[in-house]
Amino acid sequence: MTEERNIANALISGLANMAEPPTREQVEEKAIQIAGIFGYTGDLRNIVTEAMESVVTRMGAGVSLVDVNAKHDDQWIHKRDDIDWTYAEAYEEFLRNEGWPPQMVQSLGDVTGRILGHLQDPLSEGTSWNRRGLVIGHVQSGKTANYTGLIARAADAGYKFIIVIAGIHNNLRRQTQQRIDEAFIGRSSDPEDRRKIGVGLDPGYPGAATLTNINEDFNKNTAAKSGWKINDFSKPIILIIKKNVTTLTALHKWLKELNAEGNDRISDVPMLLIDDEADNASINTNKEDLDPTRTNAMIRRILGLFAKSCYVGYTATPFANIFINPDAYGDDVREELFPRDFIYCLDAPTTYFGAEKVFLDEATSESIVRPIDDCEDLIPYSHRRDDPIPELPPSLYRALDTFVVARAIRNLRGQARKHCSMMVNVSRFVPIQKAVRDFLSLREKKIREAVLANYAMPEEVSSRNMYMQGLKEAFYTEYADAGVTWEEVKVGLNGVFENLHLYVINSKSDEVLDYSRYEKEGIGLTAVAVGGLSLSRGLTIEGLTVSYMYRNTKMYDTLMQMGRWFGYRPGFEDLCRVHLSRDSINWYSHIAEAAEELVQQVKRMRRDRLSPEDFGFYVRSHPDSLLITAANKMRSGKEVTVEQSFSGRLRESYIVPIDPDVNAKNFALIADYWRSGFGGQQEKATDKGVIFRDVRVEVIGDFLTRFECHAKFSGMKSDVVSYLERIAAKHPLADVLLISPKGGSGGEAPFALKNQERVVGIGQPDGSAWRLNKDRVASRGDEKLGLSDPQLAEAKAEADRDDKSGAVSDTHYRMARKRPLLMIHSLEPKGDAVTGPIAAFGMSFPYGDYLTTIKVVVNKVWLEQMQGYNDDPDQEEDHDD
């Protein structure tokens, strides 16, 4: 493995200096040359794939929102010429040796340098200071790598005491400790194996001290055994702890007794506290040790002991309670941990396999996502811990077949020594998780036996076996275009089972998903991991290829964290499959859009010189914040009045009535307004229908008031009309798009739209309503219609400024339009379940009205309608005791 790593690193370094991106042939040629120098005769395909990935991988600088009124100099790190970047440079060298592309290492250094600039200079004058910030990343996109880089730079600059709060689970804390041992401490913290590792292998590395190890969190025993004081160390000290009341209390007590002097303050030790998964105390739980008010109160008390402190929260779910859950914390708590000084949005690298590819890009989404339609009868959303599980859904067995075939293909691609995993998350209850594992284990045994008996047999013999048929079907359904034949895969199947293991991963289980043990032996583990919340929080599942999740929560943080399928998939992205319920597919798509919008808001607010306080207000008034705030407040059944902002958002009538009379009235209304030019304006042709420009917003408000929605959507429609009225003074004129695709059916009558075809999901319609797939009416790119050339150029410039692929999205078109936009659609449902055509609308609001809100009254009915069945975190058996 080391030899392969050295060749890959040499190849990547050689390619980094090329002016033009090389072709695969050029990379292969160079790889053969380097292999010759090393005397290596093994398979080069994996090395070439990794090098190709590294050439195209880029990461932008991200964007920060800072308190514009604060007297803080972000450039202090460039003004201090006494800093020797020993820890930072060792860490960057470590990443290069791990195979990180040089450009990624460089940009990570730049970004962590910028974040450090937002912290206080630890040597600065003044007896006391505190800074509070938040870094928003992406699920499984390298947040740990980022904060480890920040820790290294902070240590170089003079931060002496560093605490990392690594979620609420033992396995995540252990995983984080192992990473920081390698990347910063330089020595294994395993009491049985205290050798130098990672950065510590460099003879001149100064190292760092730690009072936690891979087995033990911080507790009174480890602290008492040490008897140390912070200033007994010449090196920085780092602790990796869990976020629970017991641990935080023990740490506070030790700090106060041993280290605090006058006024119970530690005055001469600059400290940095990294709160990984900063929203994780947001779990609305009754478990005392995880109580969000008490955990955050203890974090505040620990910060309060230090005269000089910095708190940086890291999250992938910016709807964290720190912003929006007024019930969970008192004002003093929220005020203390609110990121008042800065919010930094990280860019995802170009090769990141994220929500955009999985849910938003229609082409890639279609090849990755598979709807689950057969789980409700066997393991329903709403089940109890002692419910019998008679059998697993056929779709889960098909997913297992797909996984076995995917592993065989990866082996054929030269990835046999790379890890390959499948994740199954269908229940929060430990007994159900075990039952699922037992069924899968039995199935895996039968597939294994069938493969052993048939992989070398002629096709007419092997295809008579039902398990071989299942594998063959999985190949032709999913991977016929993967560049290999069924004959090759069939022969390769026998190699899949040698290191295939099934695990139940939860806090009650003694099974450990230990990839590193296999790595040491040069083996690629093939793992099927069954679990619940432990699989949902920060735990990295290496080489995740097939995911199967049937859970139904609408809590942003829980749901996004369950998205373990995001990450990096070098050389096997095309094999990845994600199996989800249709509800979850819709909801994930919605969240992905909302998260993208939030980042755009940060960029706009930065330009408008607004501060984190304004962003906090915007997030609290974001329509989706209701799902979190209201869920807490609704227990008493009372109505709640909240402020909402639709700035920069698209609201669409994705729940439509299927009553032909209602639709006939709506089409007559559309024809009337079209005939009158929406108040006397001239229509202009677009690529897909017509546009009316400079329409008065009062005319649009009148149209929407008369447009009949389904009862389930009428509340949202009235909110849209109210918001339009609120911004009318600033935006008196709007555009109206009548979307009518050239190849669509219908549209023969005057003032009639041509139809857009839409798929009808399983279980639709629901009574008198049809809920559109992914809760989307417009196609991506519709907001581009009718824009002028200068506006299109502005949208492109906005996209390029994002430092990603330069792909222009609807949010960029919305920024360029700078006014409200009404889109009107005629939908033709595919199949016989719903009869069309059906009228629908979308209202897109411009950016910049962050502080303009409307009052919305929310009641229990609204909440139940939005949430449906809901996973209750109180019932989750997957917490650490």
Image (spheres, helix red, strand yellow):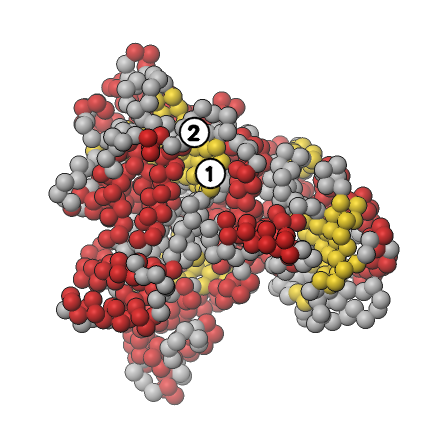
The residue beneath circle 2 is 132
- Residue at image mark 1: 64
Q: On the picture, is 644 further left or further right than 874?
A: right
Instruction: Note whether residue 622 is visible.
Output: yes
Of residue 515 and residue 876, the one placed in the foreground of this image is 515
536 or 788, nearer to the observer: 788
Image position of 5 (left or right of 508)? left
Residue at coordinates 71% horizontally, 70% vertically from top-left? Answer: 742
Between 81 and 835, the residue placed more toward the observer is: 81
Picture quadrant where residue 498 is located? bottom left
> The N terminus is located in which quarter?
bottom left
Q: Amino acid at mark 2?
A: Arg
Q: Identify which amino acid the numbered label 1 is placed on.
A: Ser
Residue 738 rendering spot, x and y as whole percentages: 75, 59
**The C terminus lies in which quarter of the figure?**
top left
Q: Residue at x 14, y 69 (%)?
A: 39
